[in-house]
Amino acid sequence: MSLDDPDHRPDPTALEEAPPVTDPAPVVQAADPTPTRRSRLRLPLLLAAPIVAIAVGLFFYLSGGRYQSTDNGYLQAGLVPVAASVSGPVVAVMVHNNQQVRAGDVLFRIDPAPFQAVVDEAAAELANARTQVSSLRANYRGGEAGLAAARARLAYAEREAARQKSLLAEGISSQNQYDQAVLAAQTARQQIQTSVQQNAGVAATLTGSVDAPTAAQPAVQRAEAALERARLNLGYTVVRAAQDGIVTKVDQLQRGSYVTAAKPVFTLAGTRLWVEGNFKEDQLNHMRVGQRATFHVDAFPDLELTGRLTSFSPGTGNSFALLPAENATGNWVKVVQRLPVEFSIDRLPQGVPLHAGLSVEVEVDTGHRRHLFGGDATSR
């Protein structure tokens, strides 16, 4: 089809009568209020953010240093070595390993037969000592009677010697009779001296007094002491718990084992527990005896214990080492030391198996306060 074809040419009238084409009216949108609201909030937020940051920083600054904590803490308990006071074979073990015991409970027994024999022998010695005291008293009284008779003989011998002397002067008596009378008087004097010395020895043996009680005599007291010692040793054959606690390592002691006096055979762990925390030396500035503390045992994460600071160790752990470090060397490197600090526990929970050696986290409330314009304070 060609445009020059008259049948297909556009009608000029139709073109003139067509309505004019107009552009659509522009759509006017309402103004968005969001940018205006954000603009209003931006300034307060910019001002509030530094203020909040400063407030938080001041809070941490003012409260900083009040609480001192360490995870280098442990539960401690008194460990008592169990040992017999006498030597001998074990005839019975009354406890088993890790058993709870009370003070006075029997732990084990040693064969009592040899010690019972010593008791019987000591009792016989005591009876013999008392008999000897009675015998000495009888000897003393016999000596006193002999001394009285000797004095009577001396008086008679002296009178006889004086009479023989008079008769000899008159020529009635002979020299031989006079000499015999003088000899009799001398013999009586010697007998008196001997009796006095014998009675003095007996009296000295009887503590200087014949009438002193038998129990006050040295021989009797010595025998009584020997008997008491023998009875004590017999009692020591029954080994008892010195305090409440838990016995451990008992299995190594069996019936028939020979125990030696003063040599530990197992251990008794006491029931009183305390906490020992090892704090760095730069944490001790505000820590004082009596301050409150809280404890968290690693074995029981949900358990919180409370207590108080009771004492500081007189030295760091290094001070009590068998081979203390020698710092006077050219290769010295500074290491922060830790000081053992002891804490009491207010109350032990029932039914929770707390044992010595468990790890504990310790936090101490020192009450330390910082002032905004310098200076520190400690609240009590």
Image (cartoon, helix red, strand yellow):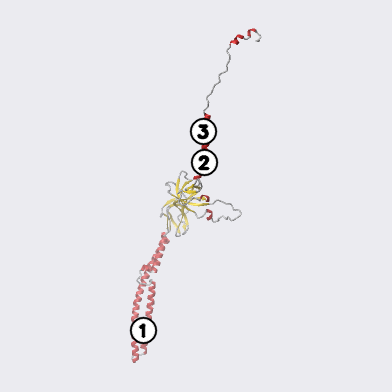
Q: How many marks?
A: 3
Image: 185 above or below 63: below
Evaluate if marks 2 and 3 touch, with contact meaning CB atoms under 8 Å apart. Answer: no
Q: CA distance from mark 1 to mark 2?
A: 125 Å
Q: Amino acid at mark 3?
A: Leu
> Secondary structure beneath disc 1?
helix
Q: Amino acid at mark 2?
A: Ile
Cα distance in 3D space between marks 2 and 3 = 20 Å
Q: Earlier in the sequence, mark 1 or mark 3?
A: 3
Which residue appears farthest toward the top when viewing the image?
A: 7
Q: Nearer the viewer, residue 221 or 21?
A: 21
Determine the secondary structure under disc 2.
Answer: helix
**Residue in the picture at 35% in, 78% down:** 147
Residue 155 visible somewhere in the drawing: yes
Write down the residue under mark 3: 41
Q: Nearer the viewer, residue 193 or 301?
A: 301
Which residue type does callout 1 highlight?
A: Ala
Q: Give how far across and how far down residue 364 sits, in percent.
A: 48, 48
- Could you tell me if residue 364 is visible in this image? no
Q: Which mark is residue 185?
A: 1
The foreground one among 378 and 286 is 378
The residue beneath circle 2 is 54
Q: Residue at x 33, y 79 (%)?
A: 149
Callout 3 secondary element = helix
* Residue 81 coordinates in the image, percent (x, y): 46, 55
- 298 relative to 217 in the view: left or right: right
Quadrant containing the N terminus is top right
Q: Residues within 10 Å of mark 2 (few under 14, many from 20)?
A: few
Q: Position of residue 281 (x, y in %)?
A: 52, 51
Q: CA distance from mark 1 to mark 3?
A: 143 Å
Q: Nearer the viewer, mark 1 or mark 2?
A: 2
